[in-house]
Amino acid sequence: MDNKKIGLFCLHGFLESGVDSYYNFRLVLEKKEITDYLFINVQGHGINEDINDFNENLVIRQIEEEYTKFKEQYNEVYLIGFSMGGVLASYLAAKYGADKLVLIAPAFSYGFRIVNNNKILEVVKKVITSPEEPDNKNKNIPNRIQASLEKIRKELVDELYGGEEEERKRFLKRLKRANLNVFITFTRLINKIKRYLAGKNIDIPTRIYISSNDEIVPIEAAFYIYKKISNINKRIIILSNTKHRLFDSQIKDEIIEEILDFLYK
C-alpha cells in the first residue's frame, strides 16, 4: 500500500450500528493493519440513542458534518455503505465527492421478501377461518394474528442474522422498540435522497455488490444507482450463494478481500 494518507468512511444498515454491519470487515482491516477508518452510528442508531428519535433531516445533517470533517484529514477518502448506508454513501459521493465508492446491497428499493404479503395473508386467513367457538372467535382474532406475525418476525431475524447472537440481540432490541414512525422515516429518507440524485451523475470508480437471493433489497436497486455512475471504472457484482448480509456470509472473506483489493491496490 502507498504511504499516502487514505481514509475509509463506512455507513451501516437500518436498525443496526457500525459495529453490527461491519464486524467481520473490521476484523480484516485490523489484521491488515489498516487503521484509518470510521464506522459512524447514524442518528438514532447509537447505543445510548432511542431509535424512535430517528429523523431523516437529522441523519443527513449528521452524515454531512461527519463526512466533511473526516474528508479534511486525508489525501484520499473512500466511501463504503451497506443497505441503508449504501444510499447514504451514494448521497455523500454525489454531493461531496470521494476517490472510490463501494455499495453493498444499496437499499434504493426494499421489501422483506421472506415475509411477503402472501404469507401474511395466509396467516390472517387461517386465523379467521379456523374452527372456534362463535362467541370467542372475533374476540381472539387480533391476539392470534399478532402471535402468528411474531413468529414470522422471528423467522425474519433468524434469516438475517443466523448465528450472530450479539448482533441479533441488538437488532431485536431496536426492532422491538421501533414504532411505526421509524419505518416511515426510513422511507422518507430513501425517497429524499433519490430526489436529490435525480439527474445527477457520480463520476467515481465504483463497485456494487448485490445478491440475487437478497431477502430485502432487489437487484433493481443496484442497477438504479449503477446507471448513475458515469465513471468507466464501475462494476456491479451479482452473487448467488449469499443473501443480504454479505459480510456475514460463507463467502465473506472472498468478498472483503476483493473490496480491499479494489480500494487499496
Image (tube, rainbow, N blue to C red):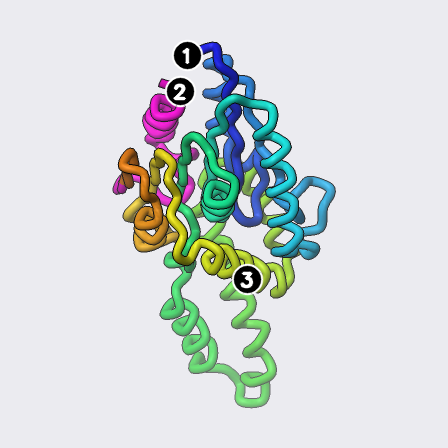
Label 3 to label 2: alpha-carbon separation: 35 Å
- The disc, 3 or 2, on the residue closer to the chain's N-terminal end is 3
Q: Which residue is mark 2?
A: 264
Give residue 48's position: percent from left, percent from top: 73, 42
Q: Residues within 10 Å of mark 1 (few under 14, many from 20)?
A: few
Toward the viewer: 186 or 148? Answer: 186
Q: Is residue 9 magenta?
A: no
Please state which amino acid type lies under the numbered disc 2: Tyr
Name the secondary structure under disc 1: loop
Q: Which residue is mark 3?
A: 188
Q: Which residue is mark 1?
A: 1
- The disc, 1 or 2, on the residue closer to the chain's N-terminal end is 1
Q: Residue furthest bottom?
A: 134
Q: Is 112 situated above or below 245?
A: below
* Residue drawn 46% across the image and 45% down it: 94
Instruction: Give the magenta-colored segment's residue range.
Output: 238-265
* Residue drawn 40% across the image and 40% down it: 104
Cβ atoms under marks 1 and 2 closer than 8 Å: yes
**Res 35 seen here:** yes
